[in-house]
Amino acid sequence: MRILVTNDDGIDSIGLHVLARSMTPFGDVVIAAPDSEYSGFGAALGPLHQMKPDVKRESIDGIDEAWSVGAPPALCAMFGRLGVFGDIDLVVSGINPGANVGRSVYHSGTIGACLTARNGGISGVAVSQSVDYFGVEGQGWESVLDNQQWQGAADVAALMVGELIADVPADPVVLNINVPNSQAADMKGWRRTRVGSEPPRAIERAQMQPAPGHADTFHVEMSWGDAIQIPEDADGGAVMAGYASVTWLGRLEADDPIQACVPAAESALDRFFA
């Protein structure tokens, strides 16, 4: 078993190092992570004609092989599938400081690496941990990272990875793990959850503010709303209630046109191409 560990926070992230070391009992571990911050990049790869990023060997305690890559996490995962870092059997991504729940699932680079791995026939496990002061969701600033109890997320991830590789799914899966910022012994338990439709704490407003000294130039300033209560059967609600959230993410597939406006739109296509 060869496990590629990546993230979207960069090669220097403590959460990445803790997660990688927790994977060593299960096989050979190679870190291939972005050389800088790529949070919010989702499953972005970048322009195909420019996919020649620099790859640099790194030294990380407890890990025999580590590389920083000048590319987003999804491209790190794709390179893993293509054999750049050996024959990869599993991609594990994280630990992200800030839960990836609700609408953030669409945009998370942590999850994007796993979705890209599955597209190439490799299962992926995304691991995220809530941060203090952000209502569960939200990327952690440096000022709060000192309070992260990384080992709690790593322990839950190690348990799930151990079970996955003991009975490898015939079809690749993506598992999204989110946990409170605590040690595993202090969590209330776990919940199998759905992807929430509302974020625990969303950006409430964005507006342009003039850039001093630059005519016709503006900065966009965003403000956060208050945390809201989410049902415990949703990923964010479970984490807010003190549980580890386990969500199996499906594929993005074509859907049946169920809204009244959709058949009308398709009828317009029929007339257009008649």
Image (cartoon, rainbow, N blue to C red):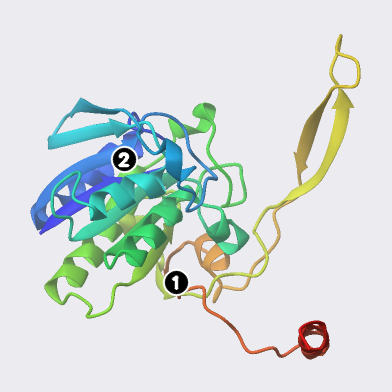
Identify the image quadrant of residue 123: bottom left
Q: Secondary structure at mark 2?
A: helix
Q: Nearer the viewer, residue 127 or 88?
A: 88
Identify the image quadrant of residue 179: bottom left
Is residue 244 visible in the rendered structure shown here? yes
Is residue 95 visible in the rendered structure shown here? no
Q: Secondary structure at mark 1?
A: loop
For the point 78% across and 89% down, the residue is: 274
Q: Are marks 2 and 1 in contact (CB under 8 Å)?
A: no
- Answer above or below: position of 4 versus 114: above
**Residue 268 in the image: x percent, y percent?**
83, 84
**Residue 12 in the image: x percent, y percent?**
34, 28
Mark 2 Cα-neighbour bin, 10 Å: few <14, some 14–19, many ≥20:
many
Q: Which mark is residue 46?
A: none
Q: Which residue is mark 1?
A: 249
Q: Nearer the viewer, residue 47 or 193?
A: 47
Q: Which residue is mark 2?
A: 16
Q: Of the residues shown, which amino acid type is indicated by label 1?
A: Leu
- Answer above or below: position of 3 versus 245: above
Identify the image quadrant of residue 56: top left
Viewed as shown, does residue 123 lie left or right of 144? left
**Residue 84 in the image: x percent, y percent?**
20, 44
Q: Of the residues shown, which amino acid type is indicated by label 2?
A: Leu
> How far, Cα to Cα, is label 2 from label 1?
22 Å
For the point 27% across and 56% down, the residue is: 91
Q: How many marks?
A: 2
For the point 22% across and 80% down, the residue is: 170
